[in-house]
Amino acid sequence: MRGRAHWSNGAKSAKFFVLPAITTVFILIMLFFPSWKTLIFGMSGILLTVYLYMIKKTTFRAFLRSIKAWLVGPAITTGSVLKIFRK
């Protein structure tokens, strides 16, 4: 690899200054709906995304997928759900 440009370096994540771009959603919610509840919600959302992106090194979508996999469990049936009603 020579220089800063490389073919595998094309999918950088979007940033809002230093923070991940998803945090702008929480910042906009705090700006457009000013109250203590939205301030707490926004700050906790920003802290969660910063924790996920910078400390755990994962994306928000991957985090949601891992929660879904944890709730559903390891065994997912591929058959039809309505199969038990057919005769």
Image (cartoon, grey):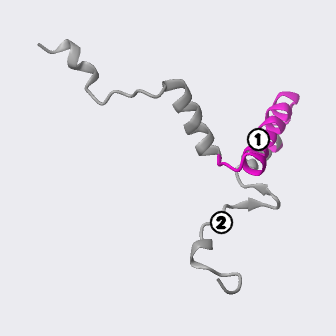
The residue lying at 85 percent from left, 35 percent from top is 39
Give amino acid for label 2.
Lys
Q: Which residue is mark 2?
A: 12
> SS of the residue at dot 2?
loop
* Residue range of the region highlighted in magenta in the rendering: 31-59
Q: Which residue is mark 1?
A: 29
> Seen in the image, is 21 located left or right of residue 78?
right
Out of 41 and 48, give the one closest to the viewer: 48
25 in relation to 1, above or below: above
Quadrant housing residue 76 = top left
- Numbered label attached to residue 58: none
Please check the rendered image and state whether residue 48 is part of the magenta-colored stretch, yes or no.
Answer: yes
State whether the magenta stretch is mostly helix, strand or loop: helix
Give amino acid for label 1.
Ile
Out of 52 and 20, give the one closest to the viewer: 52
Out of 69 and 61, give the one closest to the viewer: 69
The residue lying at 62 percent from left, 40 percent from top is 63
> Seen in the image, is 65 located left or right of residue 2?
left
